[in-house]
Amino acid sequence: MKSFAKWIVVSLGFFLSMPAWADPELVKKSVEAWVNGRYKIDAVTKTPMAGIYEVRVGVDLMYVDEKAQFLFVDGQMIDMKANKNLTQARVDELLRVNWKELPLDLALKQVNGTGKRKVVVFEDPNCPHCRTTRSALNQAKDATVYTFTYPILAADSEQKVKMALCAKDKLKAWNSLVMDRVVPDNDGKCKTDLAKIIELGRKLGVTGTPTLVFTDGKRVPNGVSLEALNRLLDTHSKV
């Protein structure tokens, strides 16, 4: 995403309200006001679609309705009056998980402090970003962390997971495996629930690790810092 498009998607701090019109010059002036002088609008052009204008900044394009309420850029639909990314809101809704249906008994359970804030994480032992997130999860105060060991990244991921699950102290072995790349000293041939965990991940459409799930159903892919994790826990794992 180019700098202008990125700014449009993430910086929705300017409230715009205007009457209906079909004047390209007025649309231009209104959008320039909305971007608050950060970018110069080079041209506003009618499109073949009725009521939709092309707004050009250099070679970057966005599309705005004649009332300048909705903006379309990089596949994102923005409600400028409500300052809301409607596309992202819809994606979040589609990815939402029913926490009550998660088989938490299959997960490794770690309780920090009171454990009142709860989160699920899907992790692969060969995942580089999982180390950062695991460090944050270990440091999060008053949090209960449910870990689904989810081997999807490398040929030896499944074997490493089985060895961790066959260790005497499974949680300790998993932390050492993810954080320090220490592979447990066993053959990994004990009975595990790994097949059920893999089936769960596929059912939920988990395609990357780490993936976090909070109690309100919000799903967050990719790694997070401790600061970001605490914000997410406070916002999406209220008790």
Image: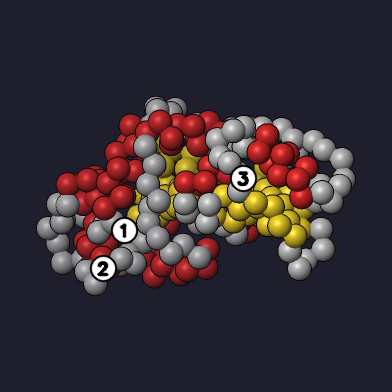
Q: Are marks 1 and 2 in contact (CB under 8 Å)?
A: yes
Identify which residue is drawn at 71% across, 44% down.
28
Q: Are marks 1 and 3 in contact (CB under 8 Å)?
A: no
- Asked if residue 191 shows in the view, the reply is yes
Q: Nearer the viewer, mark 1 or mark 3?
A: 3
Dot 2 surroundings within 10 Å: few (below 14), some, or many (20 or more)? few
Q: Amino acid at mark 1?
A: Asp
Q: Position of residue 30 (x, y in %)?
A: 73, 39
- Asked if residue 192 shows in the view, the reply is no
User: Mark 2 or mark 3, which has the lower sequence index?
Assistant: 3
Q: Amino acid at mark 3?
A: Ile
Residue that label 1 marks? 124
Identify which residue is drawn at 22% across, 45% down.
179
Identify which residue is drawn at 22% across, 69% down.
156
User: Mark 1 or mark 2, which has the lower sequence index?
Assistant: 1
Q: Nearer the viewer, mark 2 or mark 3?
A: 3
Q: Amino acid at mark 2?
A: Ala
Image quadrant of residue 126? bottom left
Residue that label 2 marks? 154
Q: Position of residue 167 (x, y in %)?
A: 21, 55
